[in-house]
Structure formats: structure tokens, C-alpha cells
Image (spheres, helix red, strand yellow):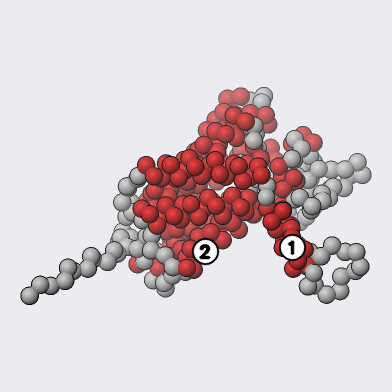
Amino acid sequence: MATDNPEPAKQVAAPLPPGWLSRWPAVTFLFPFAVFMLIGSLEPTPPKPISNNGLIEETSVENPLDQVLEAPEADEYSSNEVGLIPKIPYTYYPWVYSLKIALTAVAMVLVWPGYRTFPWQVTWLSVAVGVVGVVLWVLLCHLRLEPSIIGPLDRFLGGFIPGREPGDTPTIGLLGILGTGERSAFNPLEQMANQPAAAWAFLLVRFIGLALIVPVIEEFFLRGFLMRFVMHQQWWQVPFGEVDGTALLVGTLVPMMMHPGELLAAAVWFSMVTWLMLRTRNIWDCVVAHGVTNLLLGIYVVLFDQWQLM
């Protein structure tokens, strides 16, 4: 009597190495990312321009992206900040960023055995996704479609708010999020022009962070941890590349929240990499695609003086 062909064995997640990484599964995926974000919170951004009366000028929220993309040069700013904690001067950005990359690299070394549980297999598709991704990212960032998309929604929802004065523009402040998440826009070739060797050395550090460090820690956090965490209580047992509707939603919305000034670009790019993840079920393909995009983006920024994208 003929029997049916047996079903293929269900894919299982590779176990983390024995010891502390196995005892606390989240450490491999969260620790380097947490270090990166914690030190990154100290990074200085270009201060607000100072008006003739010594007050910080307010910019219109009509297009908040202009505040970031068309920021004046650093020497037109005052480094003074109003608040309980003085802000680190903008000129110290290379030191803070270098410290962030160094400490994140140390954290990555500590959890490297956990990374190695994911087999190193890379396909050319990851490179193709990275190349297409950088083209779409740059194009969407320059088109700046977010205000025209979010603006009508903001005004529509604002119309439901009671107590508005006659003539007031209805708003719930959605456009304000486009001015958050400001990039450092630090150009070492200009800001450190009197120290060319140091400028190029920092640019090398910047590219190491951009193309090697960030792709690993972000992909392991987002796809290795978060997208599996929302699926099952014992998320570390969920095979990589297995998703449900919630995971797909989180895989796009969270990166958009992490890139509030580039909402549309983030939505498109991270959705592309999610497709790659579903296609290859290999986290290193996602890392390589991320690295290729970031590397090409960095080259584009330097060649065409588009530092507002970094």
C-alpha cells in the first residue's frame, strides 16, 4: 500500500550558545543596539539659529524637513542651549560618535557567539536589494513627499478637535514629527578642514559605523528579536523568517518611528528588506543589504555634499 510522502521537517531556530547568552536570549539582539542608542542620545545636532535679539528663532512647521535639510552652517549657530543639562557642543560630535562606535563594537564582540548561531550564507539578491534600496532612499528623501501626504491627514483629524478659534488651521501636530530625528549632518571635511588627517580618519570611522556596525545591530534587533518577540512568548524558538501579520506590521512601523524625518523612505526600504528576509530566511542577507545601502549612501553623501542624509 502506497504511503503519502512525508512532510518536510519543520524548520527550527538555532539554539544560542550555552551559558549567559542562552540564559538571557535577548542579550545577543538587544545589548549592542542598546549601547548604540544610549551613547547616540548624547550626540550633538546643529543648534537652532540665533536671531538678532539673542533668542532661538522659531521655524515654520509648514515644512519641518526644511529645518533639517536646509540648516545653516555650524559657524552660524550658537552652542548655548536652554535647559537643565547643557548640550554637548556640535564640534564634539566626532568624539561622541567614535565613542559610540567603539563601545558598540565591544558589545558586539561580547555577543558574537550568539551571532554565529546564524549560518553565514549570503546571496547576490541581498546586494541587488541594497543597490535598489539606496536609489529609492535617496529619491524619496529628496522628493520629500511626507508633508503633502501627512498634511491633509493632519488637517482632517484636526477638524474633529473642539474649541478651535475661528480661522485657526485644524491640526493635531502630525507634521511636527517630521522635524524630529534630526540628523547630525556633520561634514568633517568642512568642520575639521584645519585638521585634514583627523577629518579623513573620522570619516573612516563614520563609514565603519554606517556600513559595518549599524547593519548588524539594527537587523539583529529588528528581525532577530522584535519581529519574533511579537509572535510568541518564547520568541527565540521562532525560526528566522517566520512571520505573522503583527510581525510584518512591526517590521515597518518601528523603523519608521526610528526615522521620523524619512518616513516614506523608511517604509519602502524596510519593507523591501522584509521581503528579502521572507525570500531567503537568512539574517545575513538582510545585514548585507543594509550594509550595501548604507555604504552607497555614504559615498553619495560625500561625493555630492548631501550631509543632511547622514
Which residue is at 61% across, 46% downward?
140
- Residue under label 2, please give it: 250
Residue that extends furthest to the front in the rendered view of this protein: 1
User: How far across and down, in percent of the image, does residue 198 sit?
Assistant: 59, 28
User: How far across and down, in percent of the image, does residue 178 sit?
Assistant: 70, 53
| Residue 154 seen | yes
**Is label 1 in a helix, a strand or a loop?**
helix
The residue under label 1 is which amino acid type?
Answer: Asp
Q: Relative to the observer, which residue lies in front, 74 or 149?
A: 149
**Is label 2 in a helix, a strand or a loop?**
helix
Side of 58 where 28 appears, left or right: left
**Position of 294 relative to 254 (above/below):** above
Using a 10 Å C-alpha cutoff, classify the residue at mark 2 as few (fewer than 14 neighbours), some (14 to 19) or many (20 or more).
some
Of callouts 2 and 1, which one flags the residue occurring earlier in the amino acid sequence? 1
Which residue is at 38% across, 63% downward?
242
User: How far across and down, in percent of the image, does residue 105 sit?
Assistant: 46, 46
Where, quadrant-wise, is the N terminus in this rendering?
A: bottom left
| Residue 110 seen | no
User: Tag count in the figure?
Assistant: 2
| Labelled disc at residue 154 | 1
Residue 21, quarter of the rendered image:
bottom left
Q: Marks 2 and 1: which is nearer the front? A: 1
Report, in whole angstroms, how far the alpha carbon at label 2 lies from the one at label 1.
23 Å
Which residue is at 47% across, 65% downward?
247
Where, quadrant-wise, is the C terminus in this rendering?
A: top right
**Position of 22 relative to 138 (above/below):** below
The residue under label 2 is which amino acid type?
Answer: Val
Q: Relative to the observer, which residue lies in front, 273 or 116?
A: 273
Which residue is at 90% across, 69% downward?
165
